Image: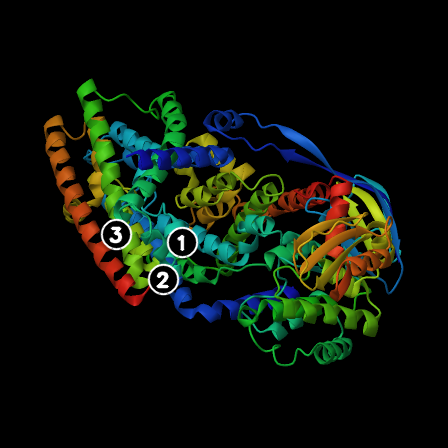
């Protein structure tokens, strides 16, 4: 546990060295959020039928998305790890006295956590103080907020577990491009990052609900706005947990089997 | 040909912060310090010279080279090279010089070397006949024929450096600036690159200014050195003079028939001793080496004696120490 | 210009050393905006229109800005990735060569894989044009061409501004994404769907409005007033690159006096 804490601390330190990068990131995401909201506002203005998610809820959805981008983006990647795998220097990594899956998982988790910690506050605070109707609103009650925090964190753990497969796949393909493409494009689409899942056609929604991606982003954000009821949220937490345990188990299994290949081939 | 007078240059450097708290503070405000890279540097270089420009890291070598090659504008002082002020009329001036940065490549990595040369021909607007003759000369004198058609990424570091230098000469410059041309090369490649530089200097009369950390480069190439430390010029003259002035230390190594008595001769200090072998260090300004040998032979049955001057490397290290740079 | 093509040629030769990776990346570039376009399509499937614009009109907007974006990313990549030139110290090399810094930086890098994105947006363009009842004239075709060109010039101008920032700091360049990626996202839709002040900024300050919204009105026959004025807006927008050029020159001068 101590190892993981120190990884996080180093990441935070590194992150702070790049202060202007952090500010630039905040500005970019803020702008991005604004544009998306205005686009949706324009769509909603002359909507013939009432859309399945209100503009209010949608705005909340978008701001949370921007604030916690580091929690939900699959292309947010660690090139160091890719280099490690493709260059064959992975052999050194195997000499470390820690479990490789756990170590990488912690590293990736720390990157996302530190990045989000540095960037989420300015966006959240600014979004709160925006004039109506563009502002971020508080969740309807305290229990919803608690549920949001729980689902968001579980979502993060789940996302890191998913992203581990990206790195594992590189052992086989030896180039991160293909995996990044599939994971990046499909994963983000089905996490509701391009358009929110409730606005998708029904047949697409059905696919999205089966895949694990939406549990990392779409689900916590809709819990926050109350679009997903508390009861459903509690059930959702168990589904998240189920996915998480399943993917962790699968990931470890997959990593061990690809590592065995590496050892056999002599790195 | 090159006349540098009173060049000064200072930089603003941001202080690096350590620790979480300081890092957080640096988010808002960052402190700066002013570093004087060059203080009133002056020298003149005549056509056809090879000049070694030496000094420890951060002494201001690269800054000087950058000013002389027109990349940087100094804070003060004048510089006249071939009638130009390097930092004015950049485009006109740089046609007359070649620059090699040892740590960076100017060749296009994935294509054969010859393609890079062809592109340089267009960059420098060299007329075809002139290009052809320079190219042939370079290929021949520098024995590049075999490697010219391979992509740069397949060349060894030594071959690459030779191509780099050739590339800087394709437009027939009168002056060649070499910033650490032998960095990272193995011993054999180093010798090849030195030979190369020498050939160019002799065959084409190109004036060469080179910076290096390897004193063997200087010894092999330059009869003149300019030593710079902490931004100031410390020495400008030939190598022999430098050796005479600062290299008064000599080492005497002697083998002899077994003798258990330790050796103690006035004016010398013992570096290592065994019953059959001794290494002494003497200062020739105080003691003559012949005197020491006479004393040794009176005490011992000598088998073999060698006298070595101090390697130039050591002289430089000693110099750095002396000037506290 | 001749030299620019020589640069293009040598870098294309280099790129062709890595064919597989080139094709993979190009396919990637094909699909990335594809998912965005799919999102757009689904939104129209649900809402039918956006402030009176129909799907194919917006698709035309989308295609034009994405084409301009991919072309500028391909041909002005040297400025887009200028920070690496600074970090590696290779800008010094540029300065010891007797050619303009602009041309040399432009020629330092090309991103040929953007052909994928270009292909994707070209398909969208053809699809949209096929489904729009436009009365074509020579002027309209010329305008369409101008639109894409002015888009390329504006994106290039923004890259140059961001590149100029590198002379002071190589951090925080992400902020330029607001205007490149952000501008691209925004200009996917006709400008008048946004709030007035946003539309104004992106017409008068960074003239993305002149790339597609204003001339689009002319092409679609939605103008009220002087057609010629609408038609010429892309040319006015192209002027954006001129001040960027001056800023760049200023940056180079700063670099040469500080060497940072």
| Mark before the other along the chain sequence, 1 or 2 | 2
Q: What is the chain letter for disc 3?
A: A
Query: For numbered disc 1, what is the local secondary structure?
Result: helix
Q: What residue would you read off at disc 1?
A: C63
Badge 2: how crowded within 10 Å, few (<14), some, or many (20+)? many
Task: Write down the quadrant of residue C4 in the picture.
Answer: bottom right
Q: Which residue is mark 3?
A: A165
Task: Answer above or below: position of A208 versus A64.
Answer: below
The residue that label 2 is drawn on is C27
The image shows residue C96, relative to residue C229, as above or below, that is below
Closer to us: B253 or B170: B253
- Residue B124: image quadrant is bottom right
Numbered disc 1: what chain? Answer: C
Chain for mark 2? C
Residue C1 in percent (x, y) is at: 65, 64
Q: CA distance from mark 1 to mark 2?
A: 17 Å
Judge from the rendering whether residue B311 lies leftward or rightward of residue C234; answer left or right: right
Neighbor class of circle 3 (other Cα within 10 Å; few <14, some 14-19, many 20+) is: some
Q: Nearer the viewer, mark 2 or mark 3?
A: 3
Horizontal and vertical percent position of residue B120: 68, 68
Closer-to-camera residue (B225/B105): B225
Q: Say if residue B54 shows up in the picture.
A: no
The picture places residue A140, in percent across and down from the top left corner, at: 21, 20
B157 to the left or right of A185:
right
Q: Is residue B283 left or right of residue A149?
A: right
Q: Looking at the figure, which quarter contains the C terminus of chain B?
A: top right
Q: Nearer the viewer, residue A178 or C211?
A: A178
If the image is split into quadrants, where does the N terminus of chain B sit? bottom right
- Residue A81 is situated, as x and y percent measured from the top left of the image, at 37, 51
How far apart marks 2 and 3 lie (CA) works out to 21 Å
Q: Are marks 1 and 3 in contact (CB under 8 Å)?
A: no
């Amino acid at each position: 546990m101590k190892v993981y804490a120190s990884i996080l601390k180093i990441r935070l330190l590194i992150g702070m060295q790049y202060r202007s990068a952090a500010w630039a990131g905040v500005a970019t995401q803020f702008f991005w959020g604004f544009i998306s909201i205005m686009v949706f506002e324009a769509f909603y203005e002359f909507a013939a039928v009432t859309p399945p998610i209100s503009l209010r809820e949608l705005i909340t959805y978008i701001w949370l998305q921007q604030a916690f981008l580091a929690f939900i983006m699959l292309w947010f990647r660690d090139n160091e790890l890719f280099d490690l795998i493709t260059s064959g220097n992975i052999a050194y990594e195997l000499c470390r006295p820690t479990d490789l899956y756990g170590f990488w998982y912690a590293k990736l988790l720390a990157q996302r956590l530190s990045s989000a910690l540095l960037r989420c506050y300015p966006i959240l605070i600014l979004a709160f103080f925006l004039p109506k109707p563009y502002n971020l609103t508080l969740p309807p009650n305290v229990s919803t907020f608690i549920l949001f925090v729980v689902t968001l964190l579980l979502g993060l753990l789940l996302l890191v577990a998913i992203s581990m497969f990206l790195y594992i796949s590189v052992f086989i393909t030896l180039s991160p491009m293909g995996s990044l493409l599939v994971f990046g494009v499909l994963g983000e689409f089905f996490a509701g990052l391009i358009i929110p899942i409730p606005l998708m056609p029904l047949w697409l929604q059905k696919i999205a609900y089966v895949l694990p991606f939406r549990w990392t982003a779409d689900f916590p954000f809709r819990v926050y706005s109350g679009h997903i009821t508390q009861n459903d949220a509690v059930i959702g937490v168990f589904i998240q947990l189920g996915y998480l345990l399943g993917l962790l188990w699968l990931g470890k299994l997959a990593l061990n089997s690809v590592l065995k290949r590496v050892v056999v081939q002599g790195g | 040909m090159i006349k540098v007078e009173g060049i000064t240059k200072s930089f603003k450097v941001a202080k690096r912060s350590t620790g979480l708290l300081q890092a957080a503070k640096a988010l808002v405000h960052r402190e700066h310090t002013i570093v004087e890279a060059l203080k009133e540097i002056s020298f003149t270089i005549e056509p056809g010279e090879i000049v070694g420009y030496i000094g420890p890291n951060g002494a201001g070598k690269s800054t000087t080279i950058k000013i002389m090659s027109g990349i940087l504008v100094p804070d003060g002082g004048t510089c006249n090279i071939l009638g130009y002020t390097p930092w004015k009329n950049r485009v006109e001036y740089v046609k007359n010089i070649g620059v090699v940065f040892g740590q960076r490549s100017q060749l296009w990595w994935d294509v054969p070397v010859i393609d890079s040369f062809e592109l340089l021909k267009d960059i420098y607007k060299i007329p075809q006949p002139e290009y052809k003759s320079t190219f042939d000369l370079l290929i021949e004198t520098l024995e590049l024929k075999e490697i010219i058609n391979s992509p740069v990424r397949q060349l060894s570091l030594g071959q690459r450096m030779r191509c780099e230098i050739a590339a800087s000469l394709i437009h027939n410059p009168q002056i060649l600036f070499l910033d650490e041309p032998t960095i990272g090369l193995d011993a054999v490649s180093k010798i090849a690159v030195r030979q190369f530089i020498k050939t160019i200097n002799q065959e084409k009369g190109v004036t060469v200014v080179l910076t290096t950390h390897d004193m063997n480069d200087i010894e092999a190439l330059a009869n003149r050195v300019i030593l710079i430390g902490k931004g100031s010029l410390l020495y400008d003259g030939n190598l022999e003079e430098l050796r005479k002035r600062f290299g008064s230390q000599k080492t005497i190594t002697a083998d002899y028939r077994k003798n258990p008595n330790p050796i103690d001769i006035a004016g010398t200090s013992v570096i290592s001793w065994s019953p059959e072998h001794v290494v002494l260090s003497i200062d020739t300004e105080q003691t003559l080496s012949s005197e020491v040998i006479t004393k040794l032979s009176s005490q011992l049955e000598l088998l073999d004696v060698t006298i070595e001057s101090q390697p130039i490397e050591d002289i430089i290290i000693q110099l750095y120490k002396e000037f506290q740079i | 210009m001749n030299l620019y093509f020589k640069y293009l040629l040598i870098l294309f030769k280099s790129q062709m050393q890595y064919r597989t990776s080139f094709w993979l990346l190009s396919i990637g570039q094909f699909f990335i905006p594809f998912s965005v376009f799919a999102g757009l399509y689904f939104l129209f499937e649900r809402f039918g229109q956006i402030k009176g614009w129909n799907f194919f009109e917006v698709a035309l907007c989308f295609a034009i800005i994405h084409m301009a974006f991919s072309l500028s990313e391909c041909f002005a990549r040297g400025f887009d990735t200028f920070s690496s030139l600074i970090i590696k110290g290779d800008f010094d090399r540029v300065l010891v060569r007797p050619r303009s810094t602009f041309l040399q930086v432009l020629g330092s890098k090309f991103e040929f894989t953007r052909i994928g994105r270009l292909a994707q947006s070209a398909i969208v363009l053809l699809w949209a044009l096929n489904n729009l009842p436009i009365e074509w004239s020579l002027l309209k075709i010329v305008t369409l061409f101008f639109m894409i060109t002015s888009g390329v010039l504006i994106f290039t101008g923004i890259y140059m501004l961001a590149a100029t920032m590198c002379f002071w700091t190589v951090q925080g360049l992400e902020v330029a994404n607001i205007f490149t990626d952000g501008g691209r996202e925004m200009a996917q839709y006709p400008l008048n769907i946004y709030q007035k002040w946003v539309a104004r900024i992106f017409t008068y300050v960074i003239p993305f409005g002149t790339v597609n919204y204003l001339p689009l009105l002319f092409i679609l026959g939605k103008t009220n007033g002087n057609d010629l004025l609408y038609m010429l807006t892309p040319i006015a927008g192209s002027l954006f690159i001129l001040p960027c050029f001056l800023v760049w020159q200023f940056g180079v001068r700063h670099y040469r006096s500080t060497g940072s």
